[in-house]
């Protein structure tokens, strides 16, 4: 009788131990599962506009109302080769702007927004632009990045979006001009969201 009870207890403990080990393994796998959302590939799903109103995607770089388009391969000033270039030019007016509102998305844990920002090669006549990134949640707009650059400058962007993990948000990419914007062809190089730890 005692022997059977002991065997039963041992079986129960073994079962619980295995279940706990499996649960830990599953949680570990979930944490390590890579996740990525390309803001470049999904840029046509965003709602783009400028001070003059809505913009059609990839209409014309010379459109006075503003421009947004994609280039798979190209160069940014001062001649650096780049891929997946999202091109954004503000409305051709003093302090014009252009922005894209992305569809709603629920973020997993440890997500960063990563990109390089700068100017398309040849945009030397620009007097500089300011890049902005906003997170829209409910009725709240939070500016998580702002950076002014001049024609021969580019900069790495790495924004930790962990405060919005598990929440439904929309992202806004915006570029605003200085006194003029005719040559303000600003680019976001391979903009994306990912949870790759230790990503450079």
Image: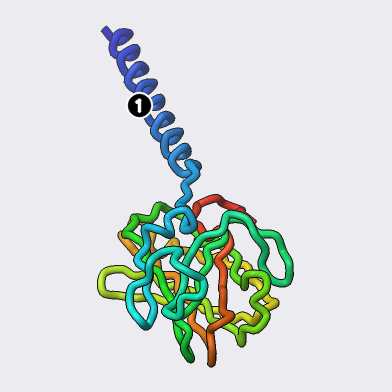
Q: Nearer the viewer, residue 92 or 104?
A: 92
Tell me: 43 left or right of 131: left
Looking at the rendered structure, the secondary structure element under dot 1 is: helix
* Residue 62 sits above or below residue 69 on the image: below
Tell me: 87 left or right of 47: right
Q: Nearer the viewer, residue 49 or 149?
A: 49
Q: Measuring 37% from the left and 62% from the top, which residue is drawn there?
A: 46
Q: Nearer the viewer, residue 47 or 141?
A: 47
* Residue 133 sits above or below residue 32 on the image: below
Say which quadrant the N terminus sits in. top left
Say which quadrant the C terminus sits in. bottom right
Tell me: 198 left or right of 45: right
Q: Measuring 31% from the left and 68% from the top, which residue is drawn there?
A: 137
Q: Residues within 10 Å of mark 1 (few under 14, many from 20)?
A: few
Q: Which residue is mark 1?
A: 16
Q: Quadrant of residue 183?
A: bottom right
Question: How many labels were placed on the picture?
Answer: 1
Q: Nearer the viewer, residue 20 or 177?
A: 177
Q: According to the image, what is the colour scheme of the structure?
A: rainbow
In percent of width and height, residue 62 lies at 51, 75
In percent of width and height, residue 168 lies at 31, 60
């Amino acid at each position: 009788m005692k022997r059977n009870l002991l065997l039963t207890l041992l079986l129960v403990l073994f079962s619980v131990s295995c279940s706990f080990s499996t649960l830990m393994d599953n949680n570990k796998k979930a944490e390590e599962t890579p996740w990525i959302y390309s803001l470049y590939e999904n840029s046509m799903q965003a709602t783009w506009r400028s001070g003059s109103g809505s913009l059609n995607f990839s209409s014309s770089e010379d459109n006075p109302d503003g421009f947004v388009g994609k280039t798979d391969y190209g160069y940014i000033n001062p001649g650096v080769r780049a891929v997946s270039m999202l091109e954004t030019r503000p409305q051709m007016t003093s302090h014009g702007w252009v922005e894209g509102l992305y569809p709603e998305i629920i973020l997993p844990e440890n997500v960063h927004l990563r990109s390089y920002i700068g100017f398309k090669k040849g945009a030397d006549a620009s007097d500089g632009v300011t890049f902005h990134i906003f997170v829209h949640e409910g009725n709240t707009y939070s500016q998580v990045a702002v950076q002014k650059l001049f024609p021969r400058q580019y900069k790495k962007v790495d924004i930790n979006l962990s405060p919005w993990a598990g929440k439904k948000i929309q992202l806004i990419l915006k570029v605003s001009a200085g006194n003029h914007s005719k040559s303000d062809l600003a680019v976001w190089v391979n903009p994306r969201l990912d949870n790759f730890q230790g990503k450079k």
